[in-house]
Amino acid sequence: MQERYQAVRGHSERLAAPLSAEDQAIQSMPDASPTKWHLAHTTWFYETFLLGRFEPGYKVCNPDYAFLFNSYYEAAGPRHARPARGMITRPSVAEVIAYRRHVYAAMLRLLGRDVPPDLRFLVELGLHHEQQHQELLVTDVLHALAQNPLKPACDPGWRPPLPIGGEARMLDGPSGLVEIGTPAETPFYFDNEGPRHRVWLDPYRIASRPVTNGEWLRFIEAGGYAQPLLWMSDGWAARYAEDWQAPLHWQQDRDGRWMQFSPAGLAPLDPDASVRHICWYEADAFARWAGKRLPTEAEWEAAAATLPLDAVADDVWQWTESAYRPYPGYRPWAGLVGEYNGKFMINTMVLRGGSVATPPGHARLGYRNFFHPDKRWQFTGLRLAENAR
């Protein structure tokens, strides 16, 4: 467990390494957080939920950090307002790294002794929690640097997803009574992934791959962003208010060619890559324009478990038709970590799969990601489905 702890913690700092102190302090919108806040918050998690409970005599690095770096754990105490995280110019990046070193050393001492099951669970939760923030770190700084007119790269070594291209096939998905949800014997999974249960699926078909940039260009050229009948009412209002004309991080050059901003900077749009940085409203409108629909999360999971779906399909999170709600028999974790997932089971939509920003080994078949339907800054795309005739 020490080796895994070291590997995950080290990956966070490698992600931050190409960024300047100024890059790490910026917050470009209320939904995003500064890089140094992610580095500090994940450290606060170990200090609050593990060291404070299992390490006798542990002394916190700085009592003020409990207020500055708590995210949404109301039961853990008061916290700094999320939209104002970019105002935390102090502590500095160097002080945040020193905080990480302080907690890192204490955790290694703790993990060097016998690790009881309740501690092992919290360590694993903390590592998966940090991996979630690693993905957010990438997408948050990408959004921040996209506001810079120079469009600087946040990771010059980043490699784009492989093109998926080719004609999408509509495959018959498993129907009838199927089981979904992460099996209870899985070594670790989030509480919202269970319990495993049965659902009934009417016959349906699901696309062999996600929608591509080239297909999305045809939607744009057909006036998809100008046809209110394709959009949900709230989605049309958001499209109009935000003046959406294309996915986030797309722009046209002086000659009208489409470009896309990525962690490696601005580059020509690849028509054969999965479309990304679209919200649920956009995905739903596209599906309607294409004469199809989004899959439910049960259809997606059943199909992903049994069908030869494109192996590159995990380069974007895929919106589903399903609202994020508890599974039958759901019980949140006990204690303070019970605030982790359950209280967000309202007004959000489920995404499945994973993305190029998801750390390896983090997502599972039953993993349930979720965002509000107007959010576009994650690596989010779609896969089409239809009722079988």
Image (tube, rainbow, N blue to C red):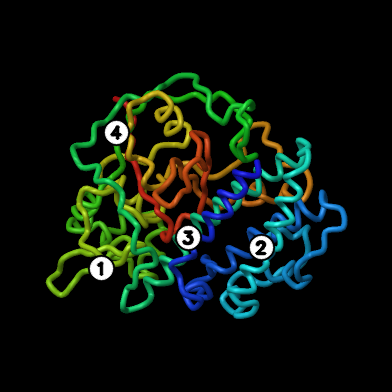
Q: How crowded is the residue under tag 3: few (<14 C-alpha within 10 Å), some, or many (20+)?
A: some
Task: Say which quadrant the C terminus sits in.
Answer: top left
* Res. 249 in view: yes
Task: Provide the residue designation for mark 3.
Answer: 15
User: Element type at marker 4?
Assistant: loop
In the rendered structure, find residue 251 and report the number of the disc placed on it.
1
* Res. 248 in view: no
User: Element type at marker 2?
Assistant: helix
- Name the residue rendered at 71%, 63% in the picture: 102
Task: Provide the residue designation for mark 2.
Answer: 101
Choose the circle earlier in sequence order: 3 or 1.
3
Image check: 68 left or right of 93?
Answer: right
Q: How crowded is the residue under tag 2: few (<14 C-alpha within 10 Å), some, or many (20+)?
A: some
Real-space Cα separation, disc 4 to disc 2, in angstroms: 45 Å
Instruction: Say whether marks 4 and 1 touch (CB < 8 Å).
Output: no
Q: Amino acid at mark 1?
A: Gln
Task: Provide the residue designation for mark 4.
Answer: 208
Image check: 62 left or right of 132?
Answer: right
Nearest-to-viewer mark from 2 and 1: 2
Real-space Cα separation, disc 4 to disc 1, in angstroms: 28 Å
Choose the circle earlier in sequence order: 4 or 1.
4
Choose the circle earlier in sequence order: 4 or 2.
2
Relative to 52, is 146 above or below?
below
Choose the circle earlier in sequence order: 4 or 3.
3
